[in-house]
Structure formats: C-alpha cells, structure tokens
Amino acid sequence: TSFVLLIAFFRPVKLAVFASASAGCTFVLPVFSSSSVNGSHASLALLVAADNNPRWCAACVGLASIAIFVRQLHSYRYFWRLSEIYVTSSLPIAIYFACKTLQKVFKLSDQRATELLYDPADRFVAPFLSTRFAALGGLFVKAGQWLANLSYVVPVVWQEHLKKLQDCAPTDPEAHVLAILKEEFGIAAKDAFAELDMKPVASASIAQVHRGVMRETGQQVAVKIQHYGIEPLMLSDLQALKRILAFCCWLGGSSWDDIKRTTEGWMNEMIHELDFRKEVANLKEVREGLTSATIDVVVPKELEGWVSKRAFVMEYCEGFRFTDLDKLAFHGVDKTALG
C-alpha cells in the first residue's frame, strides 16, 4: 500500500499503474503456495488472488486510482506541502504539551519548570523551526520574521534564531513576467518598456522586482511581479495555520486568547498583501502622512495606470537594507535613532 502511494506521488503517473499491480504481490505469494494454483494457472495469479482476497485487492486498486486522480489534478503538491506543515508543527506542539504535563504531574513551580523543562525545549525547538520555516519558504519566512518581533510572547532563543530568516525565494522565468504584464495591463512588455532587466533585483515570498525603463518617458522604474501560483499556495498555507492555531488554542485554553487575536490579525494582513492595489494605497497614505509631518523620507511613487492586483510599476530609487550595518555607517546614519 505504501509502495502505491510513493510511486503515485513521486514518480510519473504512468508508473502508478505498475504500482497498483506491484501491490498485488503482497497477496500473490500465499496464492502460489495454495494447491488451487497449478502451472497452467500461474499466469493468472493476480486474478486468482483477487478472487481469494477481493477486499484487499479492491483497496489497493482504489488507493492507486485516488493517487492517480490527485496527481493529475496537481493537488498532490498542496497535499505534500500540507503534510510537511503539519509534521513541522506537531513536534513543537508535542514537546511543549509534554512540558506542561510534566509540570503538573511533578507539581513544579513556574521558575523550576522553566529551568528544567521549558528552557531546554526552547533551545531545541528554536533552530528546528528556523530551519523548517526557511525550507517551507513563502508565508513561513514571513511568519518567522513576525514571530521574531513578538518579544512579549516568543522566547528569547526563538527570537535569536528566527531573526536570521531573510526574504528569499526562487525567481520566476521570463515567460511568466511577460505573461503577467500582458494579462494585467493589456500591453506587451516590449511596447511598454525600452528596457526591462529579466534578472530580478530582488525576490521575496510574494513577488519579485525587476528594473526597467519606460519607453514613452525614459523614466527608470521598478516593476513588481507576483510569483506564479503564489495566491492559492498562500491561501492553502493560511488555512493550515488556522487549523494549527485552533488546535493550540484548544490545548492552551483561555491563556491563548490574546495570541489568537494577534495571529488572526496578522493572517488577515497576509491576505491583503496578495493584492498590490492595497499596497499602493498604503504607500500613498504613508507618503501623505510623512509629507504632512514634514519628515524628509522618500516613498517611491506609483505610475498612473500601471497598478493592478498582481503587478505594479513605480519609480526606481537606489537604497539598501536597514540591517546593512556597513552601509548605515558609510552614510552616517544614527543607528540609535533608527532603532
């Protein structure tokens, strides 16, 4: 049965048919040892086995059929990813639940339980989550960065490891970039841009950014393109996180109420980030607020008529990460004031 699933999910679909036949070997051997099968019927061993073990045979064939169906729908990617997410979350949940149970059984004070149970658990779980979040990428890199800033909830050792996570993602091919621009703005990239560097300047969990030059005005611009298939993937991940949060709240009881409200707010914000029109609206609001407060900060402006849900174009501004200490020192930025 396991062989059927492994072949169907991780190899070409055609091999799943072979897998279903191979699964029959699990009940063919007893048939060969039976006196009901002689040499003339050896070639029909599978049929005889099916006759002798109809329920097991039907289960194997049904399992193979379901695996092939899921594979053809391309849902297997989400199925496998969900499996990884739930396995990743189950380890820390089990560890901290065990710590809580042991504290009650041995009637340990909070301080004693922290020293003997929770601190060692934190030191084990923190690097595990950091590694797994980086491997899962996308929403989980953002989740790790967000958790690292919750100093009032997250253990210090968690913060130290999760702060190492950086926005990084594989880049999409040129064909996807050109297709998105055509679909969102109704014009071919070659007609809109005099130059468009197909190598992204940066690539994060939701989108990648390309440098370009507008054909009509010659203005240097930054073109932000949403990654291929990121919306259904993130929505699926969010649903998984909601189930995990609900389970944790059930285990933790009323003590998790504040965490639940905070986490649900963050999840809603992640949904908004899938629509670049809302991001542009936020940029406008920030720009207007800074201007009215006479604070000299450059907020790049979007180009009129070049904003959509999955792509937008804005003026290009040179810059660097605020975590780049060398660049901060070179430009004479007061790190204390910045912090």
Image: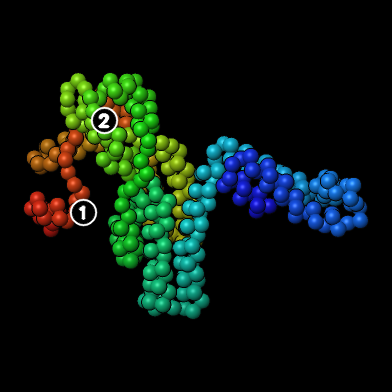
Q: Is mark 2 on a helix, strand or loop?
A: strand
The structure residue drawn at horizontal position 26% and vertical position 22%, both measured from the top left corner, is 192
Comparing 201 with 94, the one in front is 201
Residue 143 vertical position relative to residue 236 in the rendered view, above or below: below
Residue 183 seen by the camera: yes
Q: Which of marks 2 and 1 is in front?
A: 2
Residue 186 vertical position relative to residue 270 in the rendered view, above or below: above
Comparing 180 with 34, the one in front is 34
Alpha carbon distance from label 2 to label 1:
28 Å
Q: What residue type is labelled 2?
A: Leu
Give residue 287's position: percent from left, percent from top: 17, 36
Q: Mark 1 points at which residue?
A: 323
Q: Quadrant of the C terminus?
A: bottom left
On the image, which quarter does residue 226 sit in? top left
- How many numbered marks, from 0 up? 2
The structure residue drawn at horizontal position 24% and vertical position 34%, both measured from the top left corner, is 211
Q: Name the residue under label 2.
A: 196
How did the renderer colour the structure? rainbow
Give residue 286's position: percent from left, percent from top: 20, 38
Sequence order check, earlier mark of 2 and 1: 2
Residue 18 vertical position relative to residue 222 in the rendered view, above or below: below
Give residue 221's position: percent from left, percent from top: 21, 31
Give residue 193's position: percent from left, percent from top: 25, 25
Q: In this view, does 298 lie to the left or right of 194?
A: left
The structure residue drawn at horizontal position 17% and vertical position 43%, both measured from the top left corner, is 319
